[in-house]
Image (cartoon, grey):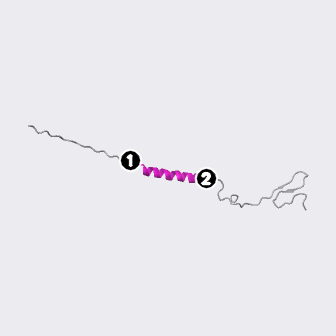
Amino acid sequence: MSDATHNNTTTTTTRDTGGNTGLAFIVGILVVVVAVLAYVIFAGDIGSPAADGGGADLNITVQGDGAPAVDASPDAKPAGDN
């Protein structure tokens, strides 16, 4: 009788598939930073006196050849009111 020898070799391969979580987190942060910067740049006059309801008073006087002066200030009375 002959003895039969059987050799079995088992190979196990493992792969780590969770390596993209950190990269997705970094890309998400970059998207938020770009969105905030775009809002600040394109939002307009943030913090300007006109946006805050303030601003400088502007008085304009228009005078033509032979015409009387016209005062366009907000406190001016119309031509018929005395």
Task: Indicate whether 6 appears above or below 71.
Answer: above
- Position of residue 9 in the picture relative to residue 56 (left or right): left
Magenta span dominant secondary structure: helix
Quadrant in the picture for the C terminus: bottom right
Q: Image quarter for residue 62?
A: bottom right
Query: Is residue 80 shown in magenta?
Result: no
| Magenta stretch in the rendered image | 20-38
Disc 1 target residue? 17
Tell me which amino acid carries mark 1: Thr
Nearer to me, 48 or 65: 48
Nearer to me, 50 or 11: 11
Q: Position of residue 38 (x, y in %)?
A: 58, 51
Tell me which amino acid carries mark 2: Ile
Q: Position of residue 71 (x, y in %)?
A: 85, 57
Q: Residue drawn 46% across and 50% down? A: 24
Task: Indicate whether 3 appears above or below 61.
Answer: above
Q: Residue drawn 38% across and 47% down? A: 17
Disc 2 target residue? 41
Residue 38 tag number = none
How far apart, in angstroms, are the residues tagged by discs 2 and 1?
Answer: 39 Å
Q: Residue drawn 47% across and 52% down? A: 26
Q: In the image, which is nearer the foreground, mark 2 or mark 1?
A: 1
